[in-house]
Amino acid sequence: MAGGSLMGAELRVLVYHATEDAAGIRKAYHDVSGVLADVPGMLGNELLHSVPDPTGFVVVSRWADLAAFREWEQGPAHRASTAPLRPFRDTRMAMPFGVYEVEASY
């Protein structure tokens, strides 16, 4: 939405990972993404690789809104569908994830 606020409509969920096994996390990401492709309200996701920290990765998922994310997160398939990525979680962080509403976008 050029120049305007989305009034918190969309949501971004960031999950931080740390590993020297780049091939392993890429495979896990693709496996999980295939399972999540048809989740209602999920608009897509990305695997980001840190430039300054070669062990740092972030999975960013885009959601239609907080309600869609919470419905999936509280559902029975959530833990099983994301299990392949769990071993890569960044245990250096007190909270290895973040949930953000989009306030504005250009």
Image (spheres, helix red, strand yellow):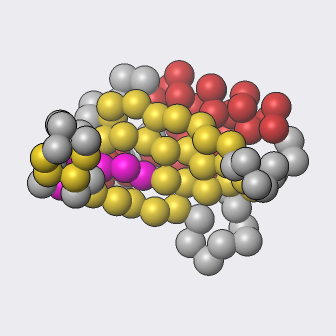
Between 3 and 19, the residue placed more toward the observer is 3
In-image side of 30 versus 75 (left or right)? right
| Residue extent of the magenta highlight | 8-13
Residue 3: give x, y in percent of width and height: 17, 44
Most distant residue in the right direction: 20
Can residue 67 be seen at all in this image of the molecule?
Answer: no
In-image side of 49 versus 40 (left or right)? right
Q: Give the residue at x 63% y 26%.
A: 31
- Location of residue 22 (image quadrant): top right
- Location of residue 21 (image quadrant): top right
Residue 95: give x, y in percent of width and height: 56, 72
- Location of residue 84 (image quadrant): top right
Most distant residue in the front direction: 3
The image shows residue 88, relative to residue 1, as above or below, that is below
Q: Number of marks in the image?
A: 0
Q: Say which quadrant the N terminus sits in.
A: top left
Q: Say which quadrant the C terminus sits in.
A: top left
Q: Give the residue at x 72% y 32%.
A: 26
Can residue 2 be seen at all in this image of the molecule?
Answer: yes
Q: Give the residue at x 82% y 31%.
A: 23
The image shows residue 37, relative to residue 82, as above or below, that is above
Residue 96: give x, y in percent of width and height: 59, 65
The question of residue 67 being in magenta is answered with no
Q: Give the residue at x 59% y 37%.
A: 47
